[in-house]
Amino acid sequence: MEWQQLEYFQTVARMEHMTRAAQFLSVSQSALSRSISRMEEELGVPLFDRVGRSIKLNRYGELFLRRVHRIMKEYEEGKHEIRNMLDEEAGEVMLGFLHTLGSHLIPDLIVTFRASYPNIRFQLNQSNTASLLQQLIQGSIDLCLLSSPDEANPSVEWKKLWSEELFIFVPAHHPLANRGAVSLEEIADEPMVSFKKGYGLRNVIDRLCMEAGFAPKIAFEGEEVPTVAGLVAAGLGVALIPDVKGLTDRKLVKLSVSSPECYRIIGAAWMKERYLSPPAQRFLQFVMHYFENAD
């Protein structure tokens, strides 16, 4: 059944007159009659009672008309919703980002952006790098802010935005706690609190430890920086993590890493060949401009 047939049926049902309906639709009466007949054949029942030259919607037609009205209503509402989503001044952006960016950076970006575009809405999704990439490829988010992927995906565009320094966090009573800076190899024999395998930050940490000449002795694995920091504060190990805003536990001590340079790269990712709505394009351009100026 074609969409045009539904429109034809709706008009004929409203007018209950084939000739006037054909004139209103600017089609021949024979073409309109054939369209209604094909619909009735497909449904397996007549939709109109024909008395001489007159037609009247029967009980099957009345039932089907109610459904057609719903279909048309949903279609019009869908078009309206899509127009609103694509509205450059009042659309919607589906944004994914790392957990560590949610405490201050993402709110700051959105507040600054909405100073210029107050009616643009956001759907926010926090996750790890691997999950964000999967959501991006599946189309459930428009773009995302994440660490550099370990493997390049030809369908994903990724642009570096900034580098984030990583620090060694130790419990306050730790022998290294009174040092301002230490080399990474100095914690080679320490139990380490890290992230679950597959997380972008876990891959960065493992690589940095290998560069320093050792494989980390993972004692505990977490999913978010505050959880990892909490385990360190409890004396369960040391950690190499970014200095996320809010890590103010007095049981923690932050140490700079003298060697090697410890950092992770954060960037924006979006699909190369996929349509990006005007609001999402505006936000992406804003984010790139924001960090260009920050440099």
Image: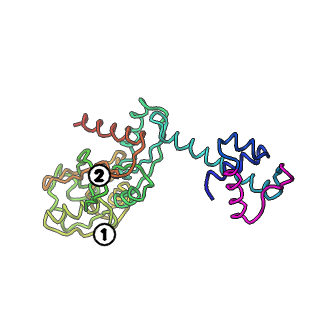
Q: Residue at x 24, y 51 (%)?
A: 265
Q: Nearer the viewer, residue 263 or 90?
A: 90
User: Amino acid under label 2?
Assistant: Glu
Callout 2: few (<14), some (14-19), or many (20+) C-alpha neighbours within 10 Å? some
> Which residue is labeled 1 in the image?
219
Which quarter of the picture shows residue 204?
Answer: bottom left
Q: Nearer the viewer, residue 17 or 254?
A: 17
**Is residue 48 part of the magenta span, yes or no?**
yes
Callout 1: few (<14), some (14-19), or many (20+) C-alpha neighbours within 10 Å? few
Which quarter of the picture shows residue 196?
Answer: bottom left
Where's the C terminus, which quadrant?
top left
Q: Nearer the viewer, residue 52 or 38?
A: 52
Q: Is residue 84 above or below residue 176?
A: above
Q: Residue at x 23, y 55 (%)?
A: 168
Badge 1 element:
strand
Give the left or right position of residue 154, taking residue 95 as reference.
Answer: left
Asked if residue 70 can be seen in this view, the reply is no
> Which residue is labeled 2 in the image?
157
Where's the N terminus, which quadrant?
bottom right
Which quarter of the picture shows residue 109?
Answer: top left
List x then y, in percent, for residue 245.
Answer: 34, 45
Q: Is residue 191 above or below residue 29?
A: below
Query: Which contiguous range is marked in magenta?
Result: 30-53
